[in-house]
Image: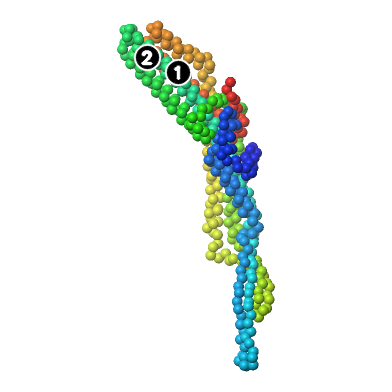
């Protein structure tokens, strides 16, 4: 499942994957699901940030592998020694005894009590935890990019339909105005038709704003120019047999979601850090060796051992903090588990209800709706229907077509969200280019 991430990490550490030339080459049409999602992921600052943090973990791992907690300490001293003699010797031509004394000392602190091994375990767990954090970010951006694409495509469809319906309302106004001038209809029919035209104009303009906003979000996600046009129009379908047992689906999500695995790694990491703090009570020792010229040119060679006394600073505060963070990590896991379960319940409910709702709109109904809207104009022109009835009927038929587009969009988004919520592989969501 995580081969992709490991391969991506290898690429990151071996090459400059975020050079300007690489970015430009990886985000160019023609689009398909791989190109679009890879571009969105690789260009997203959150993903880049987590990649750099992964590289930071590599540095921490190297620090943990040091054999000694600190560099060796070299010290030395130099002194002049002068002995005294009695006055008789001085009178007889004697001299003072004099010598130069020095000392050279080298000491090295060494790990005690398995502190190095514990630090290496922590570094390894930090790296593994970062892998799951990176996968969480990657999946979030992947499904977000697909959701943005769905919203943009359906907003464009809604815009085109709204424009077509607005043009039909203009025709209705023209017919109503002509009927009023001929004295066939009362003057209020012209006002009613103009009001309906204004309503459809507002619907059309709202759809334009919605399409422009979703287009801007998609282009921003892909780091593309706001003038870029997305001409890729895929279809989405779910390739999954869902169990009727909701508890089993919740268990499946808890097993697959990288967020849960991340919290489990954080629990293990917190416990290791607590153990590391407890080991701090066992002081490291420092061993050293010295050579000195002492007395009157007497050469002395020896060794020494020093051990810090844990008296004033007993690491109780650090232990309390580490223990508290360990307890917090368990609660964080429970909190994330609840969030995941809520997401699954909501995604499953949306998917099932929207699937049933979409089934209400068969193609015959949609085709008949389009024909009925066109026939309304002819019926009004021939005087077979009143203007107010034509407006009311048109409003119902128009709303049916708009509702279909919205339901279809919501169902496609529900499929994407269900795959994400269950933590299933992206391949469960079949994406095909629309023929």
Percent position of residue 260, x then y: 58, 41
Q: Say few, some or many: other residues with alpha carbon within 10 Å of mark 1 (under 14 / 14 to 19 / 20 or more).
A: some
Occupied quadrant, residue 281:
bottom right
| 218 left or right, relative to 34 | left
Q: Is residue 152 visible to the viewer in this orientation of the structure?
A: yes
Percent position of residue 216, x then y = 48, 31
Q: Quadrant of the N terminus?
A: top right
- x, y percentage for residue 15? 62, 42
Residue 422, quarter of picture: top right
Q: Can you identify the residue that label 2 sits on?
A: 173
- x and y percent of residue 167 in the render? 42, 17
Label 2 or label 1, whichever comes before in sequence order: 1
| Residue ID for mark 1 | 164
The relative height of residue 160 versus residue 102 in the rendered view (above or below) is above
383, above or below 275, in the image: above
Identified at 63% across, 82% down, the residue is 98
- Quarter the C terminus occupies: top right
Q: Is residue 72 left or right of residue 361?
A: right
Q: Residue 222 shows which numbered tag?
A: none
Q: Secondary structure at mark 2?
A: helix
Residue 246 seen in the current view: no
340 or 51: which is nearer to us? Answer: 51
């Amino acid at each position: 499942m995580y081969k992709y991430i490991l391969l991506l990490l290898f690429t990151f550490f071996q090459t400059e994957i975020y050079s300007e030339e690489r970015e430009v080459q990886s985000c160019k049409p023609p689009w398909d699901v791989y190109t679009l999602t890879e571009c969105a992921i690789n260009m997203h600052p959150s993903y880049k940030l987590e990649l750099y943090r992964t590289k930071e973990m590599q540095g921490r791992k190297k620090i943990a592998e040091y054999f000694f907690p600190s560099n060796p300490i070299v010290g030395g001293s130099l002194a002049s020694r002068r002995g005294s003699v009695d006055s008789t010797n001085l009178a007889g031509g004697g001299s003072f005894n004099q010598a130069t004394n020095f000392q050279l000392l080298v000491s090295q602190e060494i790990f005690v009590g398995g502190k190095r091994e514990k630090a290496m375990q922590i570094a390894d767990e930090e790296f593994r935890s970062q892998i799951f954090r990176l996968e969480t970010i990657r999946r979030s951006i992947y499904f977000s990019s697909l959701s943005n694409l769905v919203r943009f495509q359906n907003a464009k469809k809604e815009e085109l339909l709204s424009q077509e319906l607005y043009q039909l309302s203009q025709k209705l106004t023209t017919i109503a105005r002509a009927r009023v001038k001929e004295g066939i209809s009362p003057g209020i029919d012209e006002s009613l038709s103009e009001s309906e035209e204004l309503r459809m104009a507002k619907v059309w303009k709202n759809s334009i704003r919605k399409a422009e906003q979703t287009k801007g979000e998609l282009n921003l996600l892909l780091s593309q120019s706001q003038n870029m046009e997305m001409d890729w129009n895929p279809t989405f379908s779910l390739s999954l047999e869902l169990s009727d047992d909701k508890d089993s689906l919740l268990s499946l999500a808890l097993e697959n979601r990288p967020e849960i695995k991340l919290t489990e790694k954080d629990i293990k990491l917190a416990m290791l850090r607590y153990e590391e703090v407890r080991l701090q009570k066992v002081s490291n020792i420092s061993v050293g060796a010295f050579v000195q010229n002492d007395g009157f040119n007497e050469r002395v060679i020896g060794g020494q051992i020093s051990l810090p006394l844990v008296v004033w600073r007993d690491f109780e505060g650090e232990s309390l903090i580490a223990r508290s963070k360990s307890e917090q990590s368990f609660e964080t896991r429970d909190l994330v588990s609840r969030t995941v379960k809520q997401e699954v319940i909501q995604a499953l409910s949306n998917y099932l209800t929207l699937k049933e709702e979409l089934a209400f709109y068969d193609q015959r109904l949609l085709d008949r709706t389009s024909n009925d809207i066109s026939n309304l104009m002819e019926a009004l022109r021939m005087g077979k229907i009143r203007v107010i009835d034509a407006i009311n009927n048109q409003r119902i038929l128009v709303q049916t077509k708009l509702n279909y587009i919205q339901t279809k969009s919501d169902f496609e988004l529900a499929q994407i969200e269900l795959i994400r919520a269950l933590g299933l592989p992206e391949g469960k969501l079949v994406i095909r280019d629309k023929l």
